[in-house]
Image: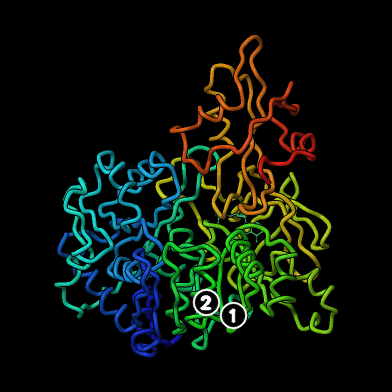
Amino acid sequence: MLGLMQSQQLLISSLIDFAERHHGEAEVISRRVEGDIHRSNYKQVAQRSRQVAHALDRWDLGFGDRVATLAWNGYRHLELYFGVSGSGRVIHTLNPRLHPDQIVWIINHAEDQVLCFDMTFLPIVQAVHSRCPTVKHYVALCDEAKLPTDSGVPGLVSYEAWVGRESTEYDWPEFDENCASSLCYTSGTTGNPKGALYSHRSTVLHAMAGAFPDGLNVSARDAILPVVPMFHVNAWGLPYNAAMIGAKMVFPGPAMDGKSIYELIESEKVNFAAGVPTVWQMLLSHMQANNLRFSTLQRTVIGGSACPPAMITTFSDVYGVEVIHAWGMTEMSPLGTVCTLKNKHLELSSEDKLKVRIKQGRGIFGVDFKIVDGEGQELPWDGKAFGDLLVKGPWVVSDYFKAEGPSPLVDGWFPTGDVATIDADGYMQITDRSKDVIKSGGEWISSIDVENIAMSHPAVAMAACIGIKHPKWDERPVIAVMKKQGVDVSREELLAYYEGRTAKWQIPDDVIFVDAIPLGGTGKMQKSKLREMLSDYRLPNT
Ligand code: AMP
């Protein structure tokens, strides 16, 4: 017997409809590329997202076609989030920090038909457009007056001219909630990047869980600053759950430095912010140097890489701001765990509370996790045993977009590539990454890519890249190199060799020449041993 409740698909269009109807006046504030502050609200965002839908119809974009963005966090990007997905197309957020060759590969793999970009990224578009045959339309996210006449980008139109003439009335289509809504590629630590293809259902459920008090705990009383980019896992879902609960949104645009972020928090009365540790490090340095205090900020979610305990205590003890440590990944939309206390912890001393808070957190309804040993046997939740972390749930990938190989799932569980412990209260703590990617400023650098370039140099016999702690960027890559006998290469020559072969920020900070790189039984490089060998090593200029 079926229940007798109304059947309504969970669609992204319903989020912006709700925001317009119930929170139309709630503000959407953006720092623009030009540096000025733009003021909008959910009513205007809703109207303009419907104009986007019309504009895409006019270009005959089909259901499920991909519309790519190269854009900062801002109101136009938000309008595209709702207009593209709401009308049944798929928004594909590109990471502008990737090397142009990687961007070309991803655009071609996704078969993007439209590319919308902030003017900051015009040079990238100029460099890649001739190699992107699927892209039929280019849209610069600017006013008509700001559109360059000689960009060289074929058929370039300004966003305002493109959507401006369209009607603000539009009937969002109804379709199966399992249809694709958005696409985000992982950085591809082994081989090519992989596309996580989110659905309307997964996005709406993820947004709902994110709003829970034991999730990100957001409500209509909040002014939210997502410093985490909208091009990186949809800014952790905040654009969606903010619309779902009618929170004020404050977008930082391209200005991520401590001073700009601080000024925005103060001027827009932000009480909740989210970002990776490196961004908060810049903010804290700025505040310490200028003896500043927050007048409204109450909570900040920190994730993307491990949040140092000192950052949690500085925020709480010096600035009275609660840090919520969270963990997730692109393949998980991204929310996996959030570290909030349980009732039993409330009486603990602040020292003991900190021991809980530094963990990556406990499960939220919708994500289940387990740790397993090398044989796949589940390990106990005792806070000591560590093993490979596997997850499952309705906002975890079941496969990658256009995947050619076997499904990544193991008996229905997705292997995260992280190694973790879980304690008796269900708090998960990452102990290591089974992958050896380097996290620099919240972005991943593939150690294999860095090694492959070194290995292509005629004087290099073997090369191993590892991340070394950096006070500002979290980690920076260094490359350990074993030279071929009888051939020489200097540190400077090798670093110069990287120029033009990879993005500047992916070039290692240093080259360390070694007699041998430690190898394991099967001939694989043992990076853990290498790290031990280099435990006293310090990066230049730190
Ligand atoms: P991405 O898919 O780029 O978001 O990266 C996901 C990976 O970042 C995870 O698999 C972890 O290795 C790492 N990560 C994310 N959040 C945390 C955290 N709070 N602590 C430690 N590592 C994290």
Image position, residue 38 (x, y; %): 34, 75
Asked if disc 1 and disc 2 are in contact, CB closer than 8 Å, the reply is yes
Category of crowding for the residue at label 2, using alpha-carbon neighbours closer than 10 angstroms: few (below 14), some (14–19), many (at least 20): many
In the picture provided, is 307 more to the left or to the right than 190?
A: right
Q: Label 1 to label 2, Cα distance in Å?
A: 7 Å
In the image, 275 versus 541, the foreground residue is: 541
Q: Label 1, on which residue? A: 297
Secondary structure at badge 1 equals loop
Q: Is residue 319 above or below residue 450?
A: below
- What type is the residue that disc 1 sits on? Leu
In the image, 536 versus 446, the foreground residue is: 536
Q: Which mark is residue 172?
A: none
Residue, x 33% and y 60% (percent of image)?
90
Image position, residue 159 (x, y; %): 23, 64
- Earlier-in-chain disc, 1 versus 2: 2
Furthest residue in direction top, as rendered: 486
Residue, x 16% and y 53% (percent of image)?
149
- What type is the residue that disc 2 sits on? Ile
In the image, 171 versus 281, the foreground residue is: 281
In the picture provided, is 301 more to the left or to the right than 379?
A: left
Q: Which mark is residue 265?
A: 2
Image position, residue 278 (x, y; %): 60, 59
Category of crowding for the residue at label 1, using alpha-carbon neighbours closer than 10 angstroms: few (below 14), some (14–19), many (at least 20): many
Displayed quadrant of residue 492: top right
Displayed quadrant of residue 314: bottom right
Q: Quadrant of ligand 1?
A: bottom right
Residue, x 42% and y 79% (percent of image)?
243
- In this rendering, the count of numbered labels is 2
